[in-house]
Each structure stands twice: as structure tokens, then as C-alpha cells.
Amino acid sequence: MATNPQSCEAEFRREFIYFIIVDRFLDGTADEEERSGTWDRGERQGLLDKTWMEWGKYWGGNLQGVIDRVDYLKQLGVTAVWLSPLFEQVDDMQFDRAPMHGYWTKDFKRINPRFLRQGDSNSLQSSSTLKDLVAALHQAGIKLILDVVCNHSSPDINGSKGVVFDDGVPLADYNNDHNGFYHHNPEITDWEDEYQLINYEMCGLATFNEQNIHFRNYIKGAIKNWLDIGVDALRVDTLKHMPVWFWQEFCTDIKRHKPEAFLFGEYGFSKPWESRSVRYANDSGMSILDFGLCDGIRFALSGREPGGFHLVEQVLGWDHVYRRANELVTFIDNHDMPRFLSIVSDARKLKLALVLLLTLRGVPCLFYGTEQGLHNDTHGGEDPYNRPMMESWDQQNDLYRLVARLAELRQTNAALTLGSHQQRYLSEEHYAYSRHYRDNHVLVAVNQAPDSATLTLQHCGLPDGTYRCLLTEQMLEVRSGCLDGLTLASQGAVVLEHRGHAVQGDLVAVFQLNGYATQPGQRLAITGSCPELGCWDTNQCYGMEYVNANTWIAEVPLDARAGSEIHYKFVVLQADGSQPVMENVLARFQALPNSGRLKLDCIWNDD
């Protein structure tokens, strides 16, 4: 009996993503190249600079380099690696730039040969380098995320624009577009105009015509080929430049092909108070990168906008507008903005940013080299200077050890992956918050002031007892829910945890419900056709945990029903014990696998 593909999506709330620009990570074949004297693997010579001085050219990083550092990533606590696009690129330069970034695709069904070992095929089915990468990552328990570009191919480069192949066979040419693969419109001038965003060109890039069914079939077919060789998830580029209906079709087909695939997209500069970006997050079929929280953290710690930590809490206060706020992919910098240390020169504040990134809600994503303090401040660290070559692999430095410790905490305490957020103290310079899920609790306090501070948290959210800070070894006592004498060093942080019991079972269903705004005292629960859900007795139903004003969640062990099916619906339990409010829908049906974790994302129905 087939399970609904949408409900089989992988559980990404528990992941920790590491984003790699492949060309700038590591040349894993340098010895081989030195012996043979062959350094440049492209069709055209002159696009490679092994001196690392010409920032627009290739610098030699490749897939073997990623393979060689899998253990480094595993020890850091990384559970998913997002690689910059691997598609075969136009092998040419526009002015002083080559497509080392991977966003000028020539063939979506082939690999960029510059990333492969010498003599290896760039066919997806035949590439030994790619197969070895997938095997090495999966053996280490690390998922592979492919960066996908559906909006455009290449700009005008020496008179050629938008020339695309289908596994080596000519398919489309912007300048001879007899198949109508492209829009032929001017560049975007008004970035608030939705029609221009979707139909006009971004930076002169040949923009695909999403109305063309042959294009849609080609791009979906190409991505399915990558999923077949072991890609686990997709990061989707330029989400806001294509209509929602396109992404709904794309996600439907991708998840029909590989139901467990997780997708998240780049809606550039998204904010939760901007309805269009929220619509894409809620209705496209995928999550999005959380630019709003990124800005909040960067502005709070850099002082470039007034408000300090109020800016972070302001963003989190909008979480209720999202259906899956706890699956937004969070970050503090990326390849399109200056690195954190280029805007805040104090490494102690980078540590605070990392504490926030790894303990606030969402799926954290670390830009390569941040754990080594990697940055280049030329021209303010703007692109391309935010993409230096990775040179250090020190696993004993403070940043690496901090990230590894917090990544371990995320894996062992469900409060950070599934839990609610509660502010405990807030000022421009001091911030304390707690995370809660069932009997799992984490308390975080940070101080960005130049002086130490001592706080009293009357209601800290931790059970009474003695706690040791995970970062400083400081011993603290909680009495009657109060944490008194919490000392924070100048630009320092404290992290305390209470680890509860994990929900265990051969089969655990994770129910998440959106769309019902509870009133004080109300609780949401699940009632259904099996004993674990109370056999329709609302006095025996399974209680859910509050996440935010729009989201409740529950892990339910369903071993007795594994391999069969359940019917269920959601119910609101009243504080005064009066009649529960039942969801106005025929009971939902779900076929169950034999084991594993099953994601069930639902929206309250009262039609």
C-alpha cells in the first residue's frame, strides 16, 4: 500500500548543513596534476588560476577535495553537505569571470569536468568521481544537497547566450530560439514588480520560459537523473523569479520520483513581513532560506541598524506566518554577501553569531570556512572576495570546537530541533531565550557588551537543579524556576540543557499541524483509529506540543500499526474540560511504512 509521497519527506529539522563552493574548497588531485603537468581540464585554456590571485577564474577545487575532507566534516557535526552547482558550465569567460560558481549551465545532465578526476567521464551514470563522492558522504551519514538552477542558463559570452544541451545533444539557443525555450525581455529594472521578476532577465542571464512544457520536462528530467545517483535534497536557486505554480509542479514531480527529497529555495532577501516571500515559503512545496533571521543576527551584532538583539526577536515574532518555520534554513552569511567577519571584525562576536545560529529555530547552514575564521575584506568582502580558498583544516581551534559542540547538542536535545522558543531576557546588548520540547529544555544567554554582565532570570524555563554550562563549564543553580547570578563574560555566551526522554519506536510518526490559533488554556491533540491515538476516545487522544502560534507538533510511536494504516484527525482540548472542538473533515488516511520516521505535515480543516 503506497504512502502519500508528501508525507515521506525526510526529517530535515535535525540536520546541520555545510555549504561548499566546490572550486574554493580543496584540490584533491593536485599531486596527480603535478605529476602529469595537466592542470586545466576545460575545453578552453586560461580559465584556471593556481596562484589564487584572479578571483573570477577557477582555482582548482574539485569533488575529490570534498571526498578527502569527509571525516573533517563529520567531526564538525555536519549531517548534510550543500555543494554549489555541479552541472557542466559554459567553458568561457565573461570579462574577467569564469563560471566557477556554477550558475551558467551548459548541460543540466552532465557534470562540470573541471570538478572530476583526470580522465573521468562527465556523464552522471559513468562518473567514478561522483559515485565515490556519494558513497563517501553516505557512509559517513552525511546527506548530499544539489544546488539547482531552473530559472536561467548563461549570459551573453562572446556572442553566445543560453546555449543548452540535453546530455550532449543540442537543445536550445537563445539567439536561435525556434523552440521558444526562453523569454526575450529586457533586464529587471523594478525589483518590486512581480511581472518583471518572473519574466525579465536577471543580470543579463538567459531566462527560461516556464510556460514551455518541453523546457519543464527537460529540467525536471535532468534533476531526477541527479536524484537517481544519490542526491538526497535540493537547494533551489532564484525561487522568486519563477511563478508559484511552476514550483508546485516541480516539487510534485520531484517528490513523486523521490518522496524523501527535501527542498529549500533561495527567495533573495525574504522577510516574514513581506507577503510574497511568505507565499512562496508556504505554497511552493519547499522551504526557503531565512534571509530575515540572517539580517537580524548580522545587524544585531554589527550595529549597522539600531535595536541590537531586539532585531532577532522581531523576526522570530513573525514565525506564525509560516507553515514550517522550524524548517526554514538559517545562516549568518553566504556567497552573495560579505562574510560575517568582513562586517564584524571581532571573532568573539562570530562565536555569538554561531551560538544563535545553532540554537535558534530552523535548520542551520554554515558557509564553508566559517569554522576557521575564513574571510577576505578586499572591497568590503563583497562578491567575489567572500569566496576565498579554504586553507586551514584545524580541528582544535575555538571556532571549530564551538560548532562541533553545538552541533552535538542539536543531535541529542530535541528542544533545538522540534521545540518552541521563549524569550527570557532582552535588551540591545543582552539576550536570553529558552527552547522546549516535551521534557527537553535548552537555555541560551548571550552578551555582546564590552563589559561582563550578571542577569537574574525569574522564570528561566529549566527544571530546578544544578547545571554546567556547555561552553564555559560555569556551574549554575536553578531554584523555584529562577536562575540568579547568571554571569556572562564580555561578548560571551552560556548554554545550559536539560535532556529529557527521546520518543522511541521502530516507527515514529512526526505530526505537525498548522492553521489553528489556540486560545490560552487550549491544547491540540490527535485522535484516531489506533490505541496510540486513543481509538477515537478524546479522553485518550495523543497530546501535541506547542511550537508557535500557528504550529503544534507531536512524535507518536506507532509500532503496533507499522506496515498497515491509520485514520486520524486533530482535536482542540478545552482548559475547562468542556466539549472538545473536532476538526471538520473526514478522517485523514495514512498508510504506514514498516519502520523509520514518517513526516506528516497537516493544515487544520474547519470548512
Image: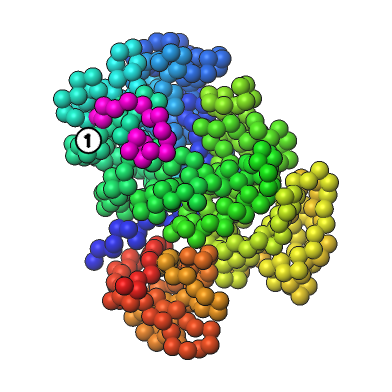
Task: Kindly identify the residue that appears in the image at 44 percent across and 27 percent down.
Answer: 101
Residue 191 figure quarter: top left
| Residue found at the very far left of the displayed protein | 178
Report the magenta residues as a range.
Answer: 182-197
Residue 131 figure quarter: top left
Residue 169 figure quarter: top left
Give percent across and percent down for residue 344.
Answer: 68, 35
What quarter of the picture does the C terminus occupy?
Answer: bottom left
- Residue 475's place in the image compared with 448, above or below, is below
Tell me if residue 229 can be seen: no
Give percent across and percent down for residue 515.
Answer: 42, 66
Three-letter code, disc 1:
Phe
Q: Secondary structure at mark 1?
A: helix
Give the overall secondary structure of the magenta segment: loop
Side of 380 where 571 appears, left or right: left
> Which one is in front, 544 or 177?
177
Tell me if residue 445 can be seen: yes
What quarter of the picture does the N terminus occupy?
Answer: bottom left
Side of 399 where 48 appears, left or right: left
Residue 312 magenta: no
Give percent across and percent down for residue 482.
Answer: 76, 70
Give percent across and percent down for residue 445.
Answer: 72, 55
Task: Kindly identify the residue that appears in the image at 40 percent across and 29 percent down.
Answer: 189
Side of 311 where 561 appears, left or right: left
Task: Kindly identify the residue that appears in the image at 57 percent across and 26 percent down.
Answer: 382
- Residue 256's place in the image compared with 66, above or below, is below
Residue 189 magenta: yes
Task: Kindly identify the residue that appears in the image at 36 percent across and 26 percent down.
Answer: 187
Residue designated by label 1: 215
